Image (cartoon, helix red, strand yellow):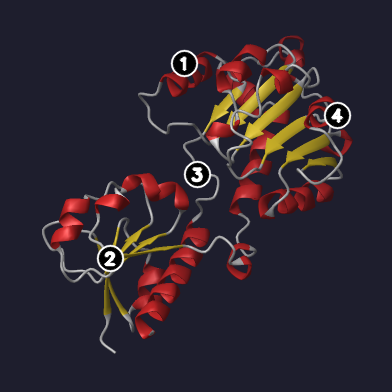
């Protein structure tokens, strides 16, 4: 079988190139040299459907993550082009990737230990214990309760990590008896790990935030549509001591909600903002790209 020509939307790591060299010709997409059998969309790059339609050799577009669907107008593509997705039910692959729960726990430590504030006052050369006493963290993690909203792969791994720190956990799913309000009341730290659906849009709002403990922390690395950030800002510095956000409704710097969050974060050191990178480690990306290439190879063998 001849090598499969794959145009990829992001530069490929050397390890992936080595893995693929016997079966694939991998190149970052070049609109001037558009001669691919497959387009592999792995990043937020915009892909012009008009250029794809002009390339008669293209048989497949493989989308590595469902959140990238908006990057291409699928309804405008030629009807003979097949759309494939990464199988989110591939537990054998996904269970080896712990990037997101590790990232969440990193945020937990940054928030609860007040690292941002401590770093800022150190840079201002403030070393007087009388002036720094107020920056001490609340309590040890081993004396804290972590509320996990959503108990899929990420939620389960997060519970495992928390257990190793001696933390108590309370879990919210649609199936258990614990109410969402109980999670707010009982937790020192709340982490959202839900998949988005029509039932949980805007589910975390002022009703939830108002019930959270005084001095508690809030983290969202799941979907921006689940959380009302306008409400969150109202409760920061009231009962909520700090928050960390990795996902947004519209991941665009011109979005009004994003601007509000950024403006608050610039003037306050109790809100951490990251650009949807919780699951983005080099080794996790390599693992997923290899899996996608295996799926592409399987398709061409049929």
Q: Secondary structure at mark 1?
A: helix
Between the C-alphas of marks 3 and 2, the distance is: 30 Å
Q: Which residue is mark 3?
A: 277
Report the residue at 75% width, 13% height from top. Answer: 134
Identify the residue at horizontal 76%, vertical 43% (top origin). Answer: 174
Q: Earlier in the sequence, mark 1 or mark 4?
A: 4
Residue 126 % position (x, y) = 63, 14
Tell me the SS state at disc 4. helix
Q: Residue 12: where, in percent of width, then height?
A: 34, 63
How far, Cα to Cα, is label 1 from label 2? Answer: 43 Å
For the residue carrying disc 1, how many other residues have a C-alpha within 10 Å: few (<14), some (14-19), or many (20+)? few
- Tell which of 200 and 147 is nearer to you: 200
Among the two numbered marks 1 and 3 on one chain, the one whose residue lies closer to the N terminus: 1
Q: Nearer the viewer, mark 3 or mark 2?
A: 2
The disc, 3 or 2, on the residue closer to the chain's N-terminal end is: 2
- Measure the alpha-carbon separation of dots 1 and 3: 20 Å
Q: Is residue 141 above or below residue 256?
A: below
Q: Nearer the viewer, residue 65 or 174?
A: 174
SS class of the residue under badge 3? loop
């Amino acid at each position: 079988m001849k090598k499969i020509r794959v145009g990829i939307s992001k530069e490929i790591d050397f390890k992936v190139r080595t893995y693929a060299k016997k079966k694939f010709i991998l190149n970052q997409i070049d609109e001037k040299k558009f001669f691919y059998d497959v387009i592999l969309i792995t990043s937020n790059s915009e892909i012009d459907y008009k250029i794809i339609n002009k390339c008669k050799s293209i048989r497949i577009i493989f989308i590595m993550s469902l959140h990238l669907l908006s990057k291409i107008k699928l309804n405008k593509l030629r009807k003979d082009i097949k759309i494939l997705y990464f199988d989110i039910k591939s537990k054998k692959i996904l269970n080896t990737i712990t990037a997101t729960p590790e990232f969440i726990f990193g945020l937990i430590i940054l928030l609860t230990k007040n690292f941002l504030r401590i770093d800022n006052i150190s840079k201002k050369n403030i070393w007087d214990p009388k002036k720094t006493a107020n920056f001490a963290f609340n309590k040890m993690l081993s004396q804290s309760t972590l509320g996990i909203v959503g108990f899929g792969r990420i939620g389960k791994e997060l519970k495992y990590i928390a257990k190793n720190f001696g933390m108590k956990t309370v879990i919210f799913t649609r199936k258990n008896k614990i109410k969402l309000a109980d999670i707010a009341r009982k937790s020192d730290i709340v982490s959202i790990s839900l998949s988005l659906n029509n039932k949980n849009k805007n589910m975390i709002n002022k009703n939830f935030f108002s019930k959270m403990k005084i001095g508690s922390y809030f983290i969202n690395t799941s979907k921006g549509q689940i959380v009302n950030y306008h409400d969150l800002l109202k409760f920061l510095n009231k009962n909520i001591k700090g928050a960390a956000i990795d996902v947004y409704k519209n991941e665009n710097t011109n979005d009004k909600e994003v601007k509000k969050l950024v403006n608050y974060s610039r003037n306050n050191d109790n809100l951490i903002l990251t650009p949807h990178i919780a699951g983005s480690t080099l080794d996790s990306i390599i693992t997923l790209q290899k899996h996608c290439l295996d799926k592409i190879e399987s398709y061409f063998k049929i």
